[in-house]
Image: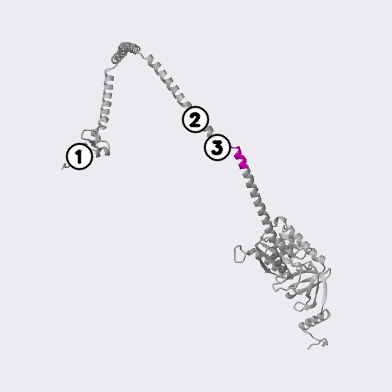
Amino acid sequence: MNDQPASNLPEYSVSEIAGALKRTVETAFGQVRVRGELSQFRRQSSGHWYGSLKDERSLIDLAMWKGTATGLSFRPEDGLEVVVTGKLTTYPGRSKYQLIVEKMEPAGVGALLAQIEARRLKLQAEGLFDPARKQLLPSLPRVIGVVTSPTGAVIRDILHRLADRFPAHVLVWPVAVQGEASAAQVAAAIAGFNAIAPGGAVPRPDLIIVARGGGSIEDLAAFNEEIVVRAAAASHIPLISAVGHETDTTLIDYASDWRAPTPTAAAERAVPVRAELAASLTMLSGRMDAALLRGLALRQERGLALARRLPQPRNLIGLAAQRVDDLAERLPKALDARAGGFALRLERAGGRLRPALLSARVERDGQRLAAMAARLAPALARPVASDAQKLARTGAGLRPFLLATRLASASSRLNEAARMLASLGPDQVLARGYAIVRGPDGHVIASAVAAAAQQNLTIRFGDGETPVFTKPPAAQGSLF
């Protein structure tokens, strides 16, 4: 038996207490507006956002549903001071109270500008705004890609301005130009235009225009997002940014290849005025024709001046003809003079030739020949006698044995030479299979052509001769 006295306090379940607290908090703080600094603010895959709002001493959990988040004009980040409007409630599952955000806005323009400036310095340090990265815009693009809202006045202004100046093929990539989804759509549109393959079914743009009308800094927040700036800097197609009015500056302007103060100015920069271009071409064509005519006239004048400096053909031919006539006139006289000189020299030479002179020279040469013949016999006899004496002295000094040995050696060499000479004789050659072909007159036939011209041949082999008839004698023709 329980000795404790019964309590008169009512007994509640956990859920009842949690529900009562929830109703009390929501009743007391149905709609509040709170200022603070975002902390640990994150987006879930469901599209909902969760985080905290804090000041120097306290912290409140936040929850922002997907429908509310899509209407934001900026991207919430940790450290950003904001003013949120919503309903204070509890989360029974964790015994925590939290603020359900229905509206969120920066605490002031200064805070948002500070956030944008910090982002600009970060991207600039990475080199995304380097002027060396800028691309030259095409002078006359055939296809222009426009990233903007398909229903606003911006696209109508761009199309109207392009039609007035120089009509071009325009591809519009529709995007939201404001709200949470805007930044991702603009970045995807820039990347999508760059992904179009050249020569495909969809023409690849030669130029991209990213355009939006004017608005507050919150309205233009999507074009300050890092994802949009990186997509613009990575574009291989030249890109013109035309966001807001002339006084508005967004981060995409720093990354683009050219910044237009307005969307209409972007269209004007994209294409030239066709009438002005045609007039310029006409002027250049006229200048080219005039330059060609001046060049032809100048060359004609130079040609005539050079022609006047050249001698006349008849003068050149006349001088040559005169020189020929002069030579023709001098030629007979020169031939006669030279022939007369040769005749005179011949006559002088013949006058010096006399029979007595020739007889005396023949007699003199005969005497010289007889004297030389008389001295020739004694001159030949003296060497022969001297050699005979030397041979006798040498033979007397030879021993009989040495003489016999030398005679035997000489005899052996003679026999060997005789055998070699015999092996080279015709009989030995014939014995090895060769033959000698002779004609009827006994001469050796050394070629096939000579053999074909003979009727009777004799072939000598090693063991005898045999006659050969190459062709029968031609039969005598009939006289009748």
Asked if marks 1 and 3 touch (Cβ < 8 Å), the reply is no
In the rendered structure, the answer to whether residue 199 lies left or right of residue 103 reads left
Marks 1 and 2: which is nearer the front?
A: 2
The residue singled out by tag 1 in the image is 468
Q: Is residue 52 above or below residue 2?
A: above
Asked if marks 3 and 2 touch (Cβ < 8 Å), the reply is no
Marks 1 and 3: which is nearer the front?
A: 3
> Which quadrant of the rendered structure holds the N terminus?
bottom right
Q: Is residue 308 magenta?
A: yes
The three-letter code of the residue at mark 3 reads Pro
Work out whether residue 196 or residue 81 is closer to the camera in this orientation and state it.
196
The three-letter code of the residue at mark 2 reads Asp
Q: Is residue 219 magenta?
A: no
Q: Residue furthest bottom?
A: 1
The residue singled out by tag 3 in the image is 313
Q: CA distance from mark 1 to mark 2?
A: 77 Å
* Mark before the other along the chain sequence, 3 or 2: 3
- The answer to whether residue 137 is visible is no
Query: Neighbour class for label 2 at 10 Å: few (<14), some, many (≥20)?
Result: few
Q: Is residue 120 above or below residue 375?
A: below
The quadrant where residue 113 appears = bottom right
Query: Residue 325 has which mark?
Result: 2
Work out whether residue 316 or residue 167 is closer to the camera in this orientation and state it.
316
* Mark before the other along the chain sequence, 1 or 2: 2
In the rendered structure, the answer to whether residue 77 lies left or right of residue 447 reads right
Q: Position of residue 130 (x, y in %)?
A: 72, 56
Work out whether residue 398 or residue 234 is closer to the camera in this orientation and state it.
234
Q: Which residues are magenta?
A: 302-313
